């Protein structure tokens, strides 16, 4: 409805008067000057419907216009008017519901601020107490008023990452992630679909620019590998070099240095998926990316790290899907994360609800908007730094999120500077770093441009000397020498092109002075375009006809990306103006491009152009809804030559602020200020503890090379997968090939038995290092089988025994296989349960206890018969863990949610015996009053507390663990710590489970779901109504998932393992 705001007034009149306003009368002219019988139905439909951005209404309108029968035509018009009336009534209802939600949300935020103020005031003396939130905000405001300086005001010269400093000793590895769209470094297909736009260009250019920075050795841009015949073959290439490294100053360029696109396979290999369909496959991407990072870190360590792994310096996610992935990847690696949102889900949801065309449920179904918003919230939880393009993005867009409060962020930052404890509360730091631009191809003279080339063109000579796009534009124009008003955008209603055209058409002095050129993407047939774009283009053509603008407006059908600089150059040669009249512009990269070519600007005052104008001072800002203001600003710039020249010179003088080198210097300075961390092990694992094991592994290198190494091209295999696949299919050649390699390590029968017996004895003896590090396959049992009291069911003992037996059936791979138990129970309860079934602890190589908050290795980290948790894992998951603050806040929140009559009876009670340093465990005394995970996480985020809350053991327990700790993340830790590849893990689950159950299904590991094993899970307490669906987390069908009956015996379980191995090998 953009550009038709006056419609709302008419709709209000219809709503106020009701059906009486719609009368059946003879059709009369819709002109208001005709004071005869006025038919509101006909007026409304003829004047409004053709401008409504609803494809079905527009098609109906075309049929109505073609109807010859007067009575039938009038009846159809009345029906259409009622349809639009109902749309408006629905819009009002949606607006009311959204207003109620926002009111409730704002109230909760204020309660959160009050709680934070109360708790943090306890640390201050009586004289210091007050309102830390209000005082800090006032101080910040006072500082901003007294010291307004240019764009780079927050960075002192001594802090800037400058090229003059000696950073040759630093060799950093940086990872960028941008998952959706078609990403490549050459001939970018920008605009081919809604997912391949400015973000693609931005991340590719940022990768190249960062690789040229001093101290940066390698930059990897992760995206999705696409092997679909629908797209070019280049999108299926595992790697693509964007630029070579800069070397060490002596001409020595490293073997792996430079910028690269790394394509990770995830989701269906032969399909190109829109971003809304990628969500269920995020876990698979994270696992694949983790494998690449580990391989690359080791390779870089051999090249430049003196044999020690070179871990990523930072992981930077772009957009919500990449932010979600970066959060999990940075948690698995324990390295800093940075986020750039590009466009935000809450902002889009707000805009779509305001349009009133779709309910929140419909929007969620079409755009997966709630999954996107939760991904953005998780990204805020994990990010050290959030990079935005404008201040408006921080205050008006990120300010809508639970996980970011501008006022609270300033308070926590002030307390951190003073060294005052914040009780585990964190807010990500938001910084404005405008996108950079590559000016290498921009050629601009400092003097005012001349129109010599235009004269040649108008004379009909030297046609080959000018760009083709100039001819395409100028064939529309009667006098191409007139100054050009240039607008370049998609024909989207939000871009407000129709208001610009009306402003031009209704201002006679402007029409006489200038031409208007509209570059509105590429089109073949308007009827084949989306409804919104088609509506804008149709309106443009109608306005050109209405105002008789033939010869004054150019709107070519096609242009290439390489034509864009020539289009700017043409406008500059005519001493024209660039205009961006969008209703809201998140940043406005085209404004920077125009300024670089010497074009003054007229731009919307809503959004990013405000910051651009503050830096460049090269034009005027206008209200995009004010048609008169638009025409006045254009006329002023074009008619006052001194003003035009000043704006041009200012733009060219200050444009360096938006160059890529300037962007990257600020970027690296900001990242360097983050709290740096990377995997650090307190114990060094030796390379050769048992020689027989090493010879076993060395002998199998042929098999691993032959079959499945997890590589960028998506082929995943392992020794065990190869053996399982070979045994499960009728392929004599493959079986013979595997047997020939295995024969290299076979000994005589007695010798083999003796060695195996001796090794088994070694495994049962407590050692310094886990046996797990020598495994090549891990069977993980994560069955959540509990009774109504939360105690483990006895039937679980039998299935544990059968799974262990199944894993040992194949003698060829049993020696390289291990077992892990993953549970919500603490170690003491887990040990007692296993002993009740006479299962020895050392049957398991790893115990993941307390919902992933602790990892134990039976036989290792043991003293006086007592197991101790892995100390490296405790350090690994400690990020943003505020145990004391969480304890106080959770009890307060849960008690406050009760009725007054029960205010002295808490629905939860802390279970100290099940708690540990990284897990707060509660007994649920009243499940009916338990707050759902979504609600609890929201309230904690509003108070600056970051954690992973979950319900477990048939909703009888609630456990709070660190933000990036979970049973799924614990498996990734085993990969990072002991190099046990996730693709070689087999995870056994039930059909239901704890609230972290869904995270365990997807990924590159194989999943075997046992039917009938779990009678009840805790998932009812996971999501609130209106949240994202399970299908947004778990893929509907996957070759990595298979099923088996819960009462299956060892042979049937072994068959399921072979089946899923075979299915995975065909991916």
Image (cartoon, rainbow, N blue to C red):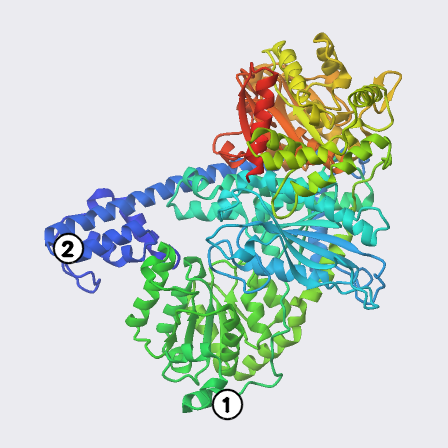
Question: Which quadrant does the C terminus fall into?
Answer: top right
Find residue 209 and report its image quarter.
bottom right
Find residue 794 and report its image quarter.
top right
The answer to whether residue 520 is above or below residue 845 is: below
Viewer-proximal residue among 92 and 674: 674
To which residue does mark 1 refer?
452
User: Is residue 422 visible to the viewer in this orientation of the structure?
Assistant: no
Q: Mark 1: few, some, or many residues within 10 Å (few <14, many ≥20)?
A: few
Closer to the N terminus: mark 2 or mark 1?
Answer: 2
Viewer-proximal residue among 298 and 951: 298
Viewer-proximal residue among 560 and 916: 560
- Residue drawn 39% across the image and 85% down it: 479
The answer to whether residue 238 is above or below residue 489 is: above
Mark nearest the camera among 2 and 1 is: 1
Residue 522 screen position, x and y as percent: 42, 65
To which residue does mark 2 refer?
67
Single out the residue that lies furthest toward the right: 864
Residue 199 screen position, x and y as percent: 57, 57
The answer to whether residue 107 is above or below residue 256 is: above
């Amino acid at each position: 409805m953009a550009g038709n705001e006056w419609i709302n007034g008419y709709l209000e009149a219809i709503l106020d008067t009701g059906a009486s306003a719609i009368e059946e009368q003879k059709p009369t002219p819709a002109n208001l000057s005709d004071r005869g019988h006025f038919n509101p139905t006909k007026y409304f439909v003829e004047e409004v419907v053709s401008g409504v951005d609803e494809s079905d209404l527009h098609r109906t309108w075309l049929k109505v216009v073609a109807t010859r029968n007067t009575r039938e035509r009038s009846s159809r018009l009345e029906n259409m008017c009622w349809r639009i009336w109902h749309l408006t009534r629905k819009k009002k209802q949606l607006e009311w519901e959204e207003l109620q939600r926002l009111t409730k949300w704002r109230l909760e935020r204020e309660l959160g601020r009050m709680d934070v103020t109360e708790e943090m005031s306890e640390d201050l003396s009586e004289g210091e107490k007050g309102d830390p939130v209000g005082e800090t905000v006032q101080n910040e405001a006072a500082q901003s008023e007294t010291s307004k300086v240019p764009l780079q005001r927050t960075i002192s010269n001594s802090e800037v990452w400058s090229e003059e400093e000696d950073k040759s000793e630093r060799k950093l590895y940086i990872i960028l992630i941008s998952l959706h769209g078609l990403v490549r470094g050459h001939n970018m297909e920008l605009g081919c679909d809604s997912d391949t736009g400015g973000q693609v260009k931005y991340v590719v250019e940022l990768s190249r620019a960062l690789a040229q920075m001093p101290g940066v050795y390698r930059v990897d841009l992760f995206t999705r590998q696409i092997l679909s015949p629908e797209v070019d073959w280049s999108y299926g290439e595992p790697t693509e070099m964007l630029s070579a490294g800069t070397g060490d100053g002596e001409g020595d360029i490293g073997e792996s240095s430079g910028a690269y696109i790394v394509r990770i396979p995830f989701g269906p290999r032969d399909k190109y998926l829109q971003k809304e369909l990628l969500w269920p496959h995020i876990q698979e991407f994270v696992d694949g990316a983790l494998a690449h990072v580990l391989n690359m870190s080791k390779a870089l360590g051999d090249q430049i790290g003196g044999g020690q792994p070179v871990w990523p310096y930072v992981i930077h996610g772009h957009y919500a899907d990449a932010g979600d992935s970066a959060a999990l990847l940075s948690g698995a690696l324990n390295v800093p994360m940075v986020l750039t949102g590009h466009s935000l889900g809450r902002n889009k949801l707000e805009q779509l609800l305001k349009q009133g065309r779709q309910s929140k449920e419909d929007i969620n179904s079409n755009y997966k908007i709630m999954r996107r918003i939760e991904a953005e919230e998780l990204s805020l939880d994990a990010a050290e730094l959030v990079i935005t393009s404008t201040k408006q993005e921080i205050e008006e867009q990120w300010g809508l999120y639970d996980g970011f409060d501008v006022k609270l962020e300033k308070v926590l930052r002030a307390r951190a500077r003073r060294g005052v404890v914040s009780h585990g509360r964190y807010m990500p730091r938001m910084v404005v770093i405008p996108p950079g631009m590559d000016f290498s191809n921009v050629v601009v003279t400092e003097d005012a441009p001349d129109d010599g080339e235009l004269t040649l063109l108008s004379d009909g000579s030297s046609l080959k000397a000018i760009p083709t796009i100039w001819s395409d534009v100028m064939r529309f124009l009667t006098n191409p020498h007139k100054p050009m008003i240039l607008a370049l955008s998609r024909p989207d209603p939000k871009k407000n092109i129709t208001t610009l055209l009306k402003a031009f058409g209704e201002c006679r002095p402007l029409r006489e002075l200038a031409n208007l050129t509209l570059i509105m993407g590429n089109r073949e047939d308007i009827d084949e375009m989306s409804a919104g774009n088609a509506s804008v283009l149709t309106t443009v053509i109608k306005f050109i006809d209405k105002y008789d603008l033939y010869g004054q407006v150019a709107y070519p059908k096609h242009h290439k990306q390489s034509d864009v600089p020539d289009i700017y150059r043409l406008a500059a040669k005519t001493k024209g103006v660039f205009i961006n009249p969008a209703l809201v512009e998140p940043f406005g990269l085209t404004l920077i491009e125009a300024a670089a070519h010497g074009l003054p600007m007229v731009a919307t005052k809503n959004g990013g152009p405000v910051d651009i104008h503050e830096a460049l001072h090269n034009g005027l800002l206008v209200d995009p809804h004010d048609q008169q203001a638009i025409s006045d600003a254009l006329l002023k710039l074009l008619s006052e030559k001194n003003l035009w020249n000043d704006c041009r010179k200012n733009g060219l003088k200050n444009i360096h602020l938006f160059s890529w080198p300037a962007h990257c210097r600020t970027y690296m300075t900001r990242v360097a200020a983050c709290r740096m961390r990377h995997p650090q092990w307190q114990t060094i694992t030796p390379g050769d503890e048992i020689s027989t094991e090493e010879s076993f592994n060395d002998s199998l290198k042929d098999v691993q090379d032959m079959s499945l190494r997890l590589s960028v091209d998506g082929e995943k295999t392992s020794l065990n997968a190869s053996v399982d696949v070979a045994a499960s299919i009728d392929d004599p050649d493959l079986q013979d090939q595997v047997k020939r390699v295995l024969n290299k390590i076979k000994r005589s029968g007695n010798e083999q038995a003796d060695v195996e017996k001796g090794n088994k004895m070694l495994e049962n003896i407590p050692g310094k290092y886990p046996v797990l590090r020598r495994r090549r396959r891990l069977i993980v049992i994560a069955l959540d089988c509990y009774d109504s009291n939360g105690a483990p069911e006895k039937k679980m003992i039998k299935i544990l025994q059968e799974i262990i037996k199944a894993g040992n059936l194949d003698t060829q791979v049993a020696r390289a296989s291990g077992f892990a138990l993953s549970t919500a129970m603490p170690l003491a309860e887990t040990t007692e349960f296993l002993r009740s079934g006479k299962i020895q602890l050392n049957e398991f190589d790893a115990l993941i206890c307390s919902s992933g908050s602790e990892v134990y290795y039976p036989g290792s980290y043991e003293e006086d018969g007592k197991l101790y948790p892995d100390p490296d894992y405790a350090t690994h998951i400690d990020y943003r863990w505020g145990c004391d603050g969480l304890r106080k806040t959770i009890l307060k929140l849960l008690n406050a949610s009760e009725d007054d009559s029960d205010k002295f009876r808490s629905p939860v009670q802390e279970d100290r015996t099940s708690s540990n340093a990284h897990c707060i465990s509660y007994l649920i005394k009243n499940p009916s009053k338990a707050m759902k995970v979504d609600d609890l996480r929201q309230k904690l985020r509003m108070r600056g507390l970051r954690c992973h809350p979950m319900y477990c053991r048939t909703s009888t327990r609630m456990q709070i663990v660190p933000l990036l700790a979970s049973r799924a993340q614990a498996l990734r830790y085993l990969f990072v710590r002991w190099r046990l590849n996730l693709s070689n893990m087999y995870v056994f689950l039930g059909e239901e489970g704890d609230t972290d159950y869904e995270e365990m299904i997807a990924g590159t590991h194989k999943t075997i779901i046992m039917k009938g094993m779990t009678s009840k899970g805790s998932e009812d307490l996971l999501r609130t109504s209106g949240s994202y669906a399970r299908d947004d987390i778990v893929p509907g069908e996957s070759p990595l998932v298979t099923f088996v009956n819960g009462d299956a015996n060892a042979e049937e379980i072994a068959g399921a393992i072979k089946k899923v191995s075979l299915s995975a090998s065909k991916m």
